[in-house]
Image (spheres, grey):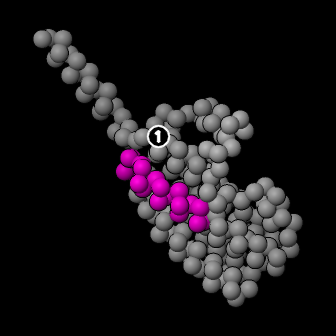
Amino acid sequence: NGAGGSHDGHDATSTSSKPSAQFNDADVTYAEGMILHHQQAVEMSDIILDKSGVNPDVVEMAKQIKKAQGPEIKEMQTWLKDWGQDDSGHKGHGGDSGSGDEMSHDGMVSPEDIKKLKAADGEQASTLFLDQMIEHHQGAVKMAKDHRRDGENPDAVELSKNVISDQNAEIKEMRTMRTSL
């Protein structure tokens, strides 16, 4: 009987020590995938911001994307730490071996396309950036929708909601810009 009591006590301590521990595999996969996805959007925005002769609206959009996604990357990295998903395991997960299907994150831009964006002049880069980023955002929205269906962590689900609304709005804006270029 006494054993039962101490067992309950043990449960209480183990659960209370990890307030944000409510998460599942879908949350982890989502955070890992979305960090990579966001980092690429930031990288593409940096490429645009380094160029001269880029359409001013496109420059503004690149700044907006960096401002939105930079903090979200930090937030997701914090969750992975809190969930005990340390970076060492993370690196192996993203490796080349067997990562073909599982890690092909929606809307990710290929290294070749990134090279094209880097090489393009301001005018070409404006169009390329919008084309690539519209598709990239659509991929993020799809990942976020899948996560809202399968994820468990309240913070992560909340972020998914924000990603869906923010990025859908940006997709609309970018499509409008695209037609005027």
| Residue 63: x %, y % from top left | 65, 70
Q: Residue at x 71, y 72 (%)?
A: 131
Q: Residue furthest front?
A: 101
Q: Is residue 7 above or below residue 170?
A: above
| Residue 122: x %, y % from top left | 82, 76
| Residue 102: x %, y % from top left | 61, 44
The kind of residue tagged 1 is Asp
Q: Residue at x 46, y 37 (%)?
A: 83
Whether residue 91 is visible, yes or no, is: no
Report whether 2 appears left or right of 122: left
Q: Residues within 10 Å of mark 1 (few under 14, many from 20)?
A: few
Count of marks placed on residues = 1
Q: Is residue 130 above or below residue 115?
A: below
Image quadrant where one finds the C terminus: bottom right
Q: Residue furthest top?
A: 2
| Residue 29: x %, y % from top left | 53, 44
The magenta-colored residue range is: 137-155
Report whether 114 appears left or right of 119: left
Image quadrant where one finds the N terminus: top left
Q: Residue at x 67, y 40 (%)?
A: 99
Towards the viewer: 112 or 70: 112
Q: Residue furthest left?
A: 1
Q: Is residue 106 magenta?
A: no
Report whether 2 appears left or right of 22: left
Towards the viewer: 44 or 30: 30
Q: Is residue 139 magenta?
A: yes
Whether residue 106 is visible, yes or no, is: yes
Q: Mark 1 sits on what residue?
A: 25
- The image quadrant that residue 100 belongs to is top right
Q: Residue at x 62, y 52 (%)?
A: 105
